Amino acid sequence: MAGHIRRLNNGYWLTQGLQLSAKVVYGSVYAVPEEIGLVDISTFGCILLHVRDPFLALVNALRLTKETVIITEEGVPKDHSGKGAEPCMQFIPDYRKGDPKQTWWRLPPEILLEFIGILVLKKRKSVP
C-alpha cells in the first residue's frame, strides 16, 4: 500500500515540469492548516470514500477554496428498479468479515452535490 501511495504522490511532482503555481500540502483532511491561505481550486482524487467523515473533509478544504472543487470518486451503480429511491451513502465495512479495510463509503454523485450545496450556501451566508 505504501508503494502505491508513493506513486500517487509522485504524480504531483511530475506536473512541476509544466510550471504550474500549484503547491502540495501533506497532512490530514481533518486539519487543513489555515496558514496555506486561500486556494483557487481544491481537488479530491478518489479520497472521500476512504475517510471516516467525508463531509468534514470537504468542510476543511472548502473553507479555504475560492472558486472550484474537483471531486473524482469511484462510480456507484444506479438503481434501475424504478422505485425512485433517494440517493444515499452506503457504509461499506463489515466487522464480521474484517473488510474492506481501506474503504468506508459508497458516495453517489448526488450525495456529493448535496454536500457541496450545503457548504456553498453556508459560505455565502457567512460572507458580509
Image: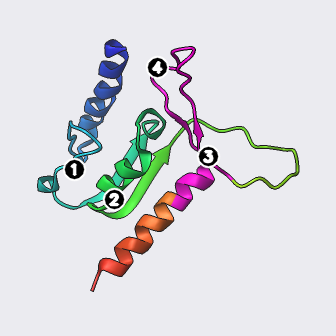
Is 14 drawn above or below residue 24 in the view shown? above
Q: Which residue is mark 2?
A: 62
Of the two numbered discs 2 and 1 in the rendering, the one whose residue sits closer to the viewer:
2
Of the two numbered discs 4 and 3 in the rendering, the one whose residue sits closer to the viewer:
4
Label 2 – label 3 distance at C-alpha:
19 Å
88 and 127: which is toward the camera: 88
User: Could you say which quadrant of the image residue 9 lies in?
Assistant: top left
Is 48 drawn above or below residue 114 in the view shown? above
Q: Amino acid at mark 3?
A: Pro
User: Could you say which quadrant of the image residue 60 lies in?
Assistant: bottom left
Percent position (x, y) of residue 87? 67, 52
Q: Which mark is residue 21?
A: 1
Q: Amino acid at mark 2?
A: Leu
In which quadrant will I find the N terminus? Answer: top left
Residue occupying image coordinates x 86% and y 52%: 83
> Of the residues under marks 4 and 3, which one precedes in the sequence?
4
Percent position (x, y) of residue 64? 26, 60
Label 4 – label 3 distance at C-alpha:
20 Å
Range of magenta residues: 87-114
Residue occupying image coordinates x 36% and y 51%: 56
Residue occupying image coordinates x 50% and y 42%: 72
Tag 4 near tag 1, CB within 8 Å: no
Q: Which residue is mark 3?
A: 108
> Of the residues under marks 2 and 4, which one precedes in the sequence?
2
Q: Which residue is mark 4?
A: 101
Of the two numbered discs 3 and 1 in the rendering, the one whose residue sits closer to the viewer:
3
Residue occupying image coordinates x 39% and y 72%: 122
